Amino acid sequence: MVDGDFFQKLEAVARAIRGNDKPFGGIQLILCGDFLQLPPVTKPGEKRVFCFQTSAWERCIDLNMELTDVRRQNDQEFINILQSIRIGRCTEDMTDQLRLTEQNIVEKDGIKATRLCTHCEDVDNINSGHLNKLSGTAEVFQSVDSDPGLSKILDSQTPVVSKLILKVGAQVMLMKNLDVNKGLVNGARGVVTGFKSVGGGAPVTEKLPQVWTE
């Protein structure tokens, strides 16, 4: 997702700072990613240039390795569909197979499937919409920063919001590993069932170890 022009600038800066004309100033790098997932992040209207389309890539990268083993799925038919979609191909048979799953129920124990989005604004809008549909009183949990002057920087660089609004019935997700053995890991999902005290208090959740993805 790193823009090609930005990649070239990073490489040039590394050489300048280290006073070394070797690729990245002699820093050894291992780059890992998938160019078929998301394009480089650019502003609207700007030309998108992939890293591998730059002269810096040709100059610096002398070994490319492709990982081909699929670890997250074991259904070969599903794997074939995913691999075809990945390269922009989807046959009518594959489309028909996917449409058969439209009525599948993925909700379990009151926990809805996690919906993945490419933009934070979409996530905020979806979450707010579902929260507003819930009845009951909203409880607000506001973070406290030791250095207020850095609050905006922290908010922009961390995945956790500074103000969390919850209601009974709200879907929640852990954002860090708490207890791996108990399944309390980053991404674990649950539902708020109440609060520890009247008019507020820490939220009480159920089924947090369950993890579902849509």
Image (cartoon, rainbow, N blue to C red):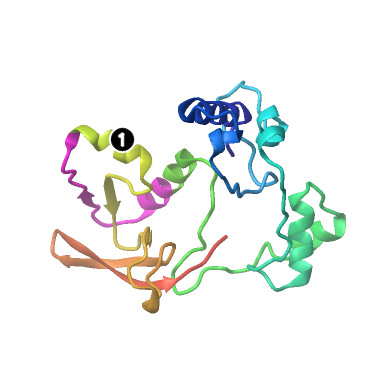
The picture quadrant where one finds residue 182 is bottom left
- Residue 61: percent from left, percent from top: 68, 41
The picture quadrant where one finds residue 45 is top right
Which residue is at a point 38% across and 78% down the rendered structure image? 181
Residue assigned mark 1: 153
- Residue 141: percent from left, percent from top: 22, 51
- Residue 103: percent from left, percent from top: 66, 65
**Eyeballing the image, is 211 above or below 125?**
below
Q: Quadrant where the C terminus lies?
A: bottom right
Residue 89 shows in the view: yes
- Side of 128 relative to 87 (left or right): left
| Local SS, label 1 | helix
Magenta stretch, residue numbers: 127-148
Q: Nearer the viewer, residue 5 or 106?
A: 5
The picture quadrant where one finds residue 68 is bottom right
Q: Quadrant where the N terminus lies?
A: top right
Find the residue positioned furthest to the bottom. Answer: 181
Find the residue positioned furthest to the right. Answer: 92
